[in-house]
Amino acid sequence: MNSAKRITVLLAEDHMIVREGLKKLLEAESDIEVIGEAATGRKAAELTHKIRPDVVVMDIAMPLMNGLEATRQILKDSPETKVLILSAHNDDLYVDRATSSGAAGYLIKQTSAHFLSEAIRDVHQGKTFFSPDITKRIQKRQKESLNRLGSPKTDATRLSSREVEVLQLIAEGKANKQIADALCISIKTVEKHRGNLMRKLDIHDIAGLTRYAIETGIIESSIQLTIV
């Protein structure tokens, strides 16, 4: 098969062993080509801008910028690219936030491996693809007309992309100077964003902002705080 006709894929996963395993799995497919790899959400957004893959396979829990915020930024910059979430999280909150961010599909890492290539092909064709158990839950929720998103999603959607980035870095334990350096902005601008976050969320301490970030899936868990 002509390589020009292959589905080009960017792998965004912070664990090298997992990333290498995914790459080997996809290399066995004649119609799929991995053209880039990223270990952070920010790098995934930067690489997508440069190489324009057909599909980004995106983990949610990554340092510097989580996969959901990276998805939003990628789709804003490169709307023709499709994002497929591949995560260890099976919670409805994560699935809801992923689809709200524009992801075309959501696979849990416990799903059988053959679903990954199938999902890549489907989202590339403009379809959606979810792990079987997630599909069942979505259908059940639609049938029952339930809304389990609650207020956290409403609050989160009121935050700008930059505010979400600052919030994640705050929750990861970064000081103002570290945040400024990571985002290439001034310390004064970081302080302004921090103030806006506290005002919008009505949360006025770092511990509260961190809890909010965990509860809404902006960071995976308190373990993420150890990332340097």
Image: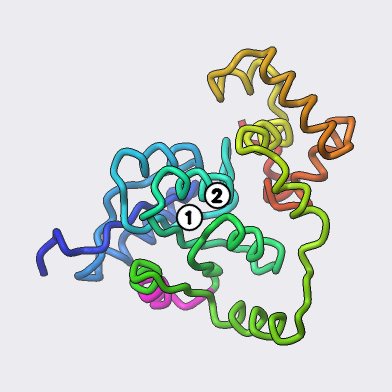
Residue 45 colored magenta?
no
What kind of residue is marked 2? Gly
What kind of residue is marked 1? Met
Q: Position of residue 74 (x, y in %)?
A: 45, 46
Could you tell whether 111 is left or right of 202 in the image? left
Residue at 31%, 38% (x, y): give it.
50
Q: Is residue 131 above or below residue 91?
A: below
Question: What separation in Å lies between label 2 and label 1 (alpha carbons)?
Answer: 6 Å
Could you tell whether 217 is left or right of 181 in the image? right
Residue 114 colored magenta?
yes
- The numbered dot on residue 199 is none
Question: Are dots 2 and 1 in contact, CB under 8 Å?
Answer: yes
Helix or strand or loop: what does disc 1 sit on? strand
Q: Which residue is mark 2?
A: 67
Q: Which residue is mark 1?
A: 58
Helix or strand or loop: what does disc 2 sit on? helix
Q: Is residue 76 above or below residue 118?
A: above
Q: Which residue range is magenta in the image?
A: 111-119
Please, what is the dominant secondary structure of the magenta stretch?
helix
Residue at the far left: name it.
Answer: 2
The total of numbered circles placed on residues is 2
Residue at 73%, 20% (x, y): give it.
192
Q: Is residue 127 above or below residue 158?
A: below
Residue at 67%, 17% (x, y): give it.
189
